[in-house]
């Protein structure tokens, strides 16, 4: 709801003349009421990714490793009752996580006593057939469970993460307000012939230290990036590029599965679809380091030049959205692609490769959601950071006004300062202040 607050010219001028803490809050409140910046409801808490609950997928992946090892051993060295017992146990572990497999001849019609205790060729063919059937059926169920899991993660993403565009108007408004306040200070300095006094220097130093010690600013490399520290800002941009490259590779994994299972006559692109989960793990580890809060209470002070922070332009990385909507859309695309896999036509030579790609894809679903969460939280922290920078600029304008009015050389100069404030008032009204 928008609250229309009308100020008299005198009251408005007085508000700008003495920007106390209470008045600074009033300015932000007015902006919030007009939908210009996040309210407490909009500026919600950081999103934490829930525990994976990927037990079924993990068990299928592990079972596939056991099955392929078992089949390779039996094919080379013969079958035994111990092998068939192992097959029963593998199937039991899958059923334990809700994966129901159809019975196979070797287990249904051939009891363990039908096989020799040592490996031999007795009933070798039926034993291999049962293992192969279990492998094929497990792959089918793996794909089905993976689709269910991706859908589940997509629902989580839609429920917990805002679209990146939700942050855009807030970033733009804070940036505009920052520039209005910074421009007012420049005009006041240009109109004043005298230098700044000691009280002004003390006020700016105090405001800068309050900014850098604010509890809402994280003690992390990411926060340094949002405050404009060059190396960390470059690091954030690199993470954005690496995340996009990673998702392109993941998308091609489904094409590879499609090809390997005989649904597509040729690969859409030649890509090493195996091993991408290692890249995802490395990317996640880098994000964990980048967002980790340091134990040192003076971490930001040590890495940010406080004496120049107040004179720097607003950091470009803080007003540019970190993209992640494409990660949210990708969950839908992966689901569609996997649902379109209608047949499984695979020979023994491809089982290991299919298992490897499916195993990687299963892990990468987690990484995609965690990447989206990271960039969502990064954009949220950008809004918080910009809000703190605007508050600092309000304090700086207050200190500067007191300084120049104290040192005004004549009435004409004092009137010039007043005109500048009235101009600021008009601009602030345009931003939503009534």
Image (tube, rainbow, N blue to C red):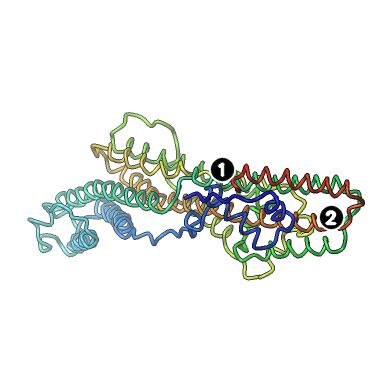
- Image depth: mark 2 or mark 1 in front: 2
Towards the viewer: 326 or 391: 391
Looking at the image, how many numbered discs can be counted on the residues? 2
Q: Residue at x 62, y 42 (%)?
A: 430
In this rendering, position of residue 66 left or right of residue 137: right
Q: Which residue is mark 1?
A: 241
In this rendering, position of residue 354 left or right of residue 286: left
Towards the viewer: 73 or 302: 302
Report, in whole angstroms, how far the alpha carbon at label 2 lies from the one at label 1.
49 Å
**How busy is the neighbourhood of tag 2: few (under 14 within 10 Å), some, or many (20 plus)?**
some
Towards the viewer: 319 or 401: 401
Residue extending furthest toward the left = 109
Image coords of residue 125 (percent x, y): 16, 49
Q: Residue at x 82, y 60 (%)?
A: 200
When asked about the image quadrant of residue 241, the answer is top right
Q: Residue at x 50, y 51 (%)?
A: 376
Towards the viewer: 216 or 329: 216
> In terms of sequence position, does the residue under pointer 2 or pointer 1 come before the other?
1
Image coords of residue 177 (percent x, y): 65, 47
Q: Which residue is mark 2?
A: 405
Determine the secondary structure under disc 2. Answer: helix
Residue extending furthest toward the top = 265
Image coords of residue 107 (percent x, y): 12, 57
């Amino acid at each position: 709801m928008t609250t229309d607050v009308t100020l008299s010219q005198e009251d408005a001028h007085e508000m700008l003349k003495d920007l106390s803490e209470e008045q600074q809050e009033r300015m932000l409140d007015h902006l919030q009421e007009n939908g210009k910046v996040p309210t407490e409801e909009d500026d919600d808490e950081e999103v934490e990714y829930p525990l994976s609950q990927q037990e079924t997928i993990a068990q299928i992946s592990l079972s596939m490793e056991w099955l392929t090892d078992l089949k390779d051993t039996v094919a080379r060295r013969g079958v035994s009752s111990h092998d068939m017992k192992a097959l029963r146990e593998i199937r039991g572990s899958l059923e334990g996580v809700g994966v129901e497999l159809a019975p196979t001849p070797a287990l249904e019609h051939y009891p363990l006593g039908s096989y020799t205790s040592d490996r031999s060729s007795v009933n070798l063919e039926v034993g291999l057939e049962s293992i192969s059937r279990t492998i094929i059926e497990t792959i089918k169920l793996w794909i089905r469970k993976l689709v269910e899991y991706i859908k589940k993660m997509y629902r989580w993403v839609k429920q917990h993460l805002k679209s990146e565009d939700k942050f855009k108007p807030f970033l733009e408004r804070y940036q505009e307000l920052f520039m209005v306040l910074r421009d007012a200070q420049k005009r006041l300095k240009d109109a004043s012939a005298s230098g700044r006094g000691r009280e002004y220097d003390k006020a700016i130093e105090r405001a800068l230290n309050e900014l850098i010690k604010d509890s809402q600013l994280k003690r992390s490399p990411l926060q340094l990036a949002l405050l404009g520290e060059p190396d960390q800002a470059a690091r954030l941009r690199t993470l954005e590029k690496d995340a996009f490259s990673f998702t392109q590779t993941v998308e091609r994994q489904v094409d590879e599965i499609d090809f390997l299972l005989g649904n597509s006559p040729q690969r859409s692109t030649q890509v090493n679809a195996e091993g991408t989960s290692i890249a995802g793990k490395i990317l996640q580890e880098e994000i964990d380091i980048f967002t980790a809060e340091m134990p040192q209470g003076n971490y930001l002070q040590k890495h940010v030049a406080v004496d120049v922070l107040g004179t720097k332009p607003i950091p470009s990385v803080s007003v540019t959205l970190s993209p992640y909507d494409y990660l949210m859309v990708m969950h839908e695309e992966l689901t569609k692609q996997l649902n379109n896999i209608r047949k499984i036509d695979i020979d023994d030579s491809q089982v290991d490769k299919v298992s490897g790609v499916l195993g990687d894809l299963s892990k990468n679903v987690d990484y995609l959601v965690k990447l989206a969460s990271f960039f969502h939280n990064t954009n949220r922290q950008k809004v918080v950071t910009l809000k703190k920078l605007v508050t600092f600029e309000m304090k700086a304008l207050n200190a500067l006004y007191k300084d120049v009015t104290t040192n005004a050389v004549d009435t004409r100069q004092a009137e010039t300062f007043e005109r500048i404030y009235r101009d600021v008032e008009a601009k602030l009204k345009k931003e939503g202040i009534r």
